[in-house]
Image: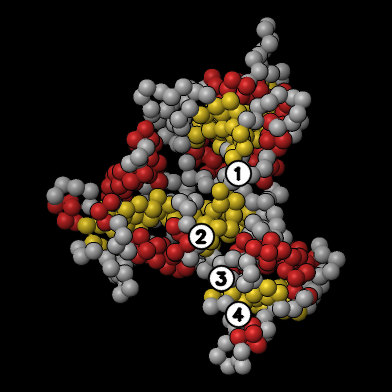
Amino acid sequence: MVAPPQSAPPSDNDLVPSGVLLRWSTPADGVHLASLCEAVFCENEPRFVGSKRAQVARLMHGDHPMMAPGDVAIAVDERLRERGENPVVSCVCLVTQDVMYDGVEFKLGRPENVATRREYRRRGLVRRLMDIVHARCEAEGILVLAIAGIHHFYRQFGYEYALSLGGQRTTLISMLPPLKPNTLEPYTLRSATATDTPLIRQLIEDSESKHMVRTLISTSTWLYYLQQPPSKPKNLWDIHVVIDTATLKPCGALAIWSPRWYDAIDVKFIELLRNVPLQIALPSIARQILQLSTPQTAVPPDPLTQIIWSLGPTHRVYDVLNRPGTYPLAAVATPPYAWYVRIPSLARFLMHVAPALERRLAASDCHRNYTGELRVHFYAAPGFRLEFGAGRVVRADEFRVNYTDAKSPVEAANVADARFPPMVFWKCVLGYRSVEEVLHMYPDAGIMRVEAIGLLETLFPKRESCLRGLYM
């Protein structure tokens, strides 16, 4: 990232407490940031005190692949430092990830660890810090932002739920079939090393290549996680390789959240080669997971009662867990939450991912070699106009309906081909909802030109995504 400015003056619209300075972080702020985040996020969860502090320390260490020590917008009250207290009273971290949209790469900005000291809340600090983060993303050409945050809160900053997040199945340990007497486990686990990086990358690529939006994890990023020296704060994921006992060869990989949460071991990903029989492998792997030394901070420790498979809304492992006639390993299904998404200029994003749109046109019997325009308005917010020539995206512009010069709002709106409430159409662009579903959900969404519905459905199909909140 480019070097950020070290301060940002407050706007007239926000009441920043007197004596509080807004600026970007420096390496010297690392300890104070870790202390603030620990105090805020662990206030009601004291058992996770150590893991939150370690997480922030990793992000601020200086060698993290997705964040640098200068990537946190902070509010500082130096009067607290004079009293021997933590001067950092509010913060928003900016994590960046490499993401792919149907074959087109782009940078994703992720505001994380949004925290404010209790006595400084409800004074506009988070809004000002979010403004600073958004301005920096705009300057650096980051077209999309996403937050995994608490319910409803981030809508006020221009975010909308538009990508699936999470989804789980839970296996009760009491349901695990025991290993038969005088037999060896068909599969075992060992800690992953740097030499396992090609296998892990290939397993994830094979599993997620079909997704519309997916996280790209480079070789250098995996090496960062697999080569951590003992002197550095420990990662939140313990990564293991699955070994076929018969051949002694690696055949899969998985990651477990560490330290353990409550009474469960949380499997964050598991991928196996396609020739591995899942109905045999999964019970064996589950038993091996129970043998791992997974630390937890609760004292006394919670008794271990379940394994959580946090593999997204769908996964082929779920199919086996739920398959009748094998074994009842899936006790509870937890539906996914959603990522908040912010796309400041949809026209710019659509131009960036034009190759994906053009492939969809080329694959369509109805719209192959399409020439024409598509105009979509978002009421008071800027919509978009796409111009096509022989199946190619010629240009993408912002589009607004001119209500001032029209005889009526209906006449003004009819110059567009379709209308949607602000931010809602992001759900269609990212494949989270189909055009038909959005039209059904929102009475103020509509089609003004009947031919537009088919074009919209061709360009923006519903499709599953897998955006990993990966910063471990």
Kindly report the distance in space between the C-alpha atoms of the residues bearing marks 2 and 3.
16 Å
**Amino acid on which disc 2 is placed:** Leu
* Secondary structure category for the residue under label 3: loop
Q: CA distance from mark 1 to mark 3?
A: 26 Å
Q: Identify which amino acid the numbered label 3 is placed on.
A: Pro
Q: Which residue in the structure is indicated by mark 1?
A: 335
Identity of the amino acid at label 1?
Pro
Q: Is residue 172 left or right of residue 116?
A: right
N-term mark: 2 or 3: 2
Residue 299 badge: none
Residue at 60% from the left image edge and 28% from the top image edge? 171
Q: Residues within 10 Å of mark 1 (few under 14, many from 20)?
A: some
Residue that carries the numbered disc 2 in the rendered image:
145
Which secondary structure, mark 2?
strand
Looking at the figure, which quarter contains the N terminus?
bottom left
Mark 4, residue position: 399
